[in-house]
Amino acid sequence: MYMYPFTGYQPDVPKVTHGKGIWLFDENGKGYIDSTSGPMTVNLGHCHPDIIAAMQDQIKRLHFAYRFHFRSDEAEQLAARLVALSDDNKGYAFFMNSGSEASEAAYRIAMDYFRIKGNNKKTLALGRRISNHGNTIQSLTYGDDRARKVNLLNKVIDPAVSDLRLPPYYDLHKPAGCSSDEWLRVCLSETFETIDQIGAEHIACVFAEPITASSGGVLIPHPDYFRELKAGLKARDILLIADEIVTGLGRTGEWFNMRKWETESDITIIGKGLGAGFTPISGVMISKQIGDSLASLSPPHFVGHTYSGNPLSAGVALAVLDTLENKIGMASIRARGSYFGRLLQEMLGDADIIADIRGQGLLWAVETTLGRQRAEEFVQAGHQQGINLYPCRLSGKDGDALTFLFTPPLVISESEMDELVGRFSRVLSRMA
Ligand SMILES: Cc1ncc(COP(=O)(O)O)c(C=O)c1O
């Protein structure tokens, strides 16, 4: 019997049999708009013909070669392509299978980097409040997904380490009467006071999503936040790891969202949209300077798993990048995002139930005035209306607002966006 995520959970959700573009269809032929590309993953839509063709070609030619035994063009080209697209300090990339693995690998690289410099004490990774950087035991220590780690605390996760949370900067959280600039100062002071109390000599790296996506419901930082965070970390010899697992590869209308904040991370992790739902693949991109220094290690690093950098997944990811670059393009994602944002405002902005609408590119959230305890009812109502809805985990000032994420496939057309927002609007009016 297939084991669903929760014991006793026989989900009352549709059983789907096929998909096309933004649609998934159930066994009775009913269509559902996949309003979030699954978990922000199916970025080219379902069953994109170009990727199917590339995948068939790849699987016929070469689907697996173990990276310790053979080199392959696919992994080497994918690394080179990502480094070129980053257009910043990055010089190296390697591949894993999930975002969580990429996250932990980045942490290990950060520790290795300091070890090579003769510093064995820098072993801590810190994250921020309202964050998710993975679901392995280690990545849960620097993420803030309390529900996922609750049964692990005091057993395999030391709460004293896992509670070392830095404040993120979000306008929505600022106290009444406080300007955005003043709030930025408050957040940065608390950040660096926390770091200095722990002792920078113990901290290898800080993880941050450039825009907090599903955990908080598209929380966009102050434009100066990342520049100042990076400067403060650099002064303390701490690496900044950008978690672009959701925001990267076009989701926000940029190849990498850190560019928007004019900040270069030391390490960037990517996942989800890299395989676009066709194959599990994630990546770790490392600055040239850190990568060069790691190369002096022999062997350079021990991170990786059986399937890391396999030619099939790397070939699929190359085809995904081709389609994104040559058939979609960042400018068109930005244009679609502007249309989508306007539509959300026009169709929902005046409703009493709506607290906030925010986003960038095709990464949007609609925060309601309702509590998150109603999430399940809305998901059910969404299915009735033929739209899949994704409630965020820790949204709103008190963390319990009912907020929906909207991250449709990047190929969505204007008429499909009209249909998506129309269906959501019907759900809202029935449930309000
Ligand atoms: C920002 C972020 N980082 C890391 C992860 C972990 O990725 P995975 O589920 O592929 O392990 C997720 C997954 O939702 C995520 O949203």
Image: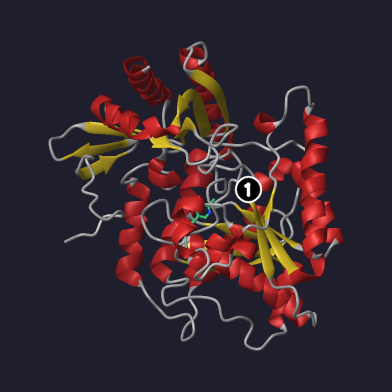
Q: Residue lying furthest left in this view? A: 28
Q: Is residue 281 above or below residue 36?
A: below
Question: Looking at the rendering, in which quadrant would you find the N terminus?
Answer: bottom left
Dot 1 surroundings within 10 Å: few (below 14), some, or many (20 or more)? many
Q: In this picture, is 220 found above or below 422?
A: below
Residue at the spot of label 1 = 129
Q: How many marks?
A: 1
Secondary structure found at label 1: loop
Q: Say which amino acid is labelled 1.
A: Arg
Q: Is residue 416 left or right of residue 166?
A: left
Question: Compared with residue 195, is residue 423 higher up or lower down, i.e. above or below?
Answer: above
Question: Is residue 176 at all visible to an observer of this figure?
Answer: yes
In the rendered image, the vertical position of residue 402 relative to residue 121, given as above or below: above
**Residue 241 location (% of width, % of height):** 67, 59
Q: Position of residue 30 (x, y in %)?
A: 19, 32
Q: Pick whichever, 142 or 91, lies toward us.
A: 142
Q: In the rendered view, how is the structure colored?
A: secondary structure
Viewport quadrant of the C terminus = top left
Give the x, y percent position of residue 378.
34, 29
**Residue at x-position 67% and y-position 32%:** 173
Residue 351, given in percent of the width and then of the height, sits at 47, 12
